Image (cartoon, rainbow, N blue to C red):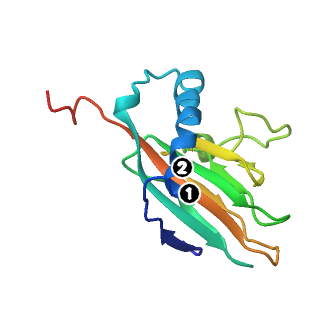
Amino acid sequence: MDGIQKILKLKKDSAPHNFIQSIHGYIKEVMVEGFGWKYSPEKVGITEIWAIINKKNTFNQTHNHPNTYLSAAYYVKAPKDCGDIQFHEPNEVKKFRHPVIEKKNELNSSGFSVKAEEGNLLVFPSYLYHSVGKNLSSEDRIVISFNVDVITYKDAKY
Ligand SMILES: [Fe+2]
């Protein structure tokens, strides 16, 4: 990864602590309304959280986030032309062989991008490979990113 990452140290009632508390409602909405998953608040948690600062001309290489269900990006600072996030089609078969594409749509797409917009919270399945375009702005692009996991039967103690 070509950005600078720093670990946040959480203290009760600190800004990071309050940030995490405020996003749990959005996580619930994505899990229930978006994915149709069973939601048990005591089993859902943010397992990692970090900040990414992309200086001018830096970008993030293609990657995914293993061992977690959902990942997210909260855009703290997103100046114009700071680089959009690109999601890559996970179905390799679609790229293997196909006729010439005359009209792009969901069935023949090799991926899609989402524009970086300040204040937006983007939540996506962790298995999706993604990358971030080069920051062509002279200002920093600042994102708080995190992973959300759910305790499953394998982790249950009883
Ligand atoms: Fe990522």
What residue sits right under mark 1 in the picture?
15
- From the viewer's perspective, tell me whether residue 153 is left or right of residue 21: left
Mark 1 lies within 8 Å of ligand 1 (Cβ measured): no
152 to 82, vertically: above or below: above
Residue 84 drawn at (x, y percent)? 74, 58
* Within-10-Å neighbours for mark 2: few <14, some 14–19, many 20+: few
**Residue drawn at x 66%, y 46% as measured from the top left:** 121
Badge 1 amino acid: Ala
Q: Quadrant of the C terminus?
A: top left
Q: Quadrant of residue 57?
A: bottom right
In this orientation, which residue lies closer to the viewer: 95 or 80? 80
Secondary structure at numbered mark 1: helix
**Eyeballing the image, is 14 above or below 68?**
below
Q: Is any part of residue 128 visible from this angle?
A: no
Label 2: state its secondary structure: helix
Q: Say which residue label 2 marks.
A: 18
Does the residue at mark 2 contact the one at mark 1 (Cβ under 8 Å)?
yes
Rendering quarter of residue 100: top right
| Horizontal and vertical percent position of residue 60 | 61, 67
Q: What's the distance in space between the residues labelled 2 and 1, CA to CA?
A: 5 Å
Q: Quadrant of the N terminus?
A: bottom right
Question: Which residue is found at the position 56% from the left and 50% from the top?
Answer: 19
Q: Which of these two is toward me, 124 or 119?
A: 119
Q: Label 1: how many residues lie within 10 Å, few (<14), some (14-19) or many (20+)?
A: few
Q: Amino acid at mark 2?
A: Asn
Q: Can you give x and y, in whole percent of width and height, for residue 10 in the image?
A: 43, 59
Most distant residue in the left direction: 158
> At which x and y percent is residue 134?
73, 70
The dot on residue 75 is none
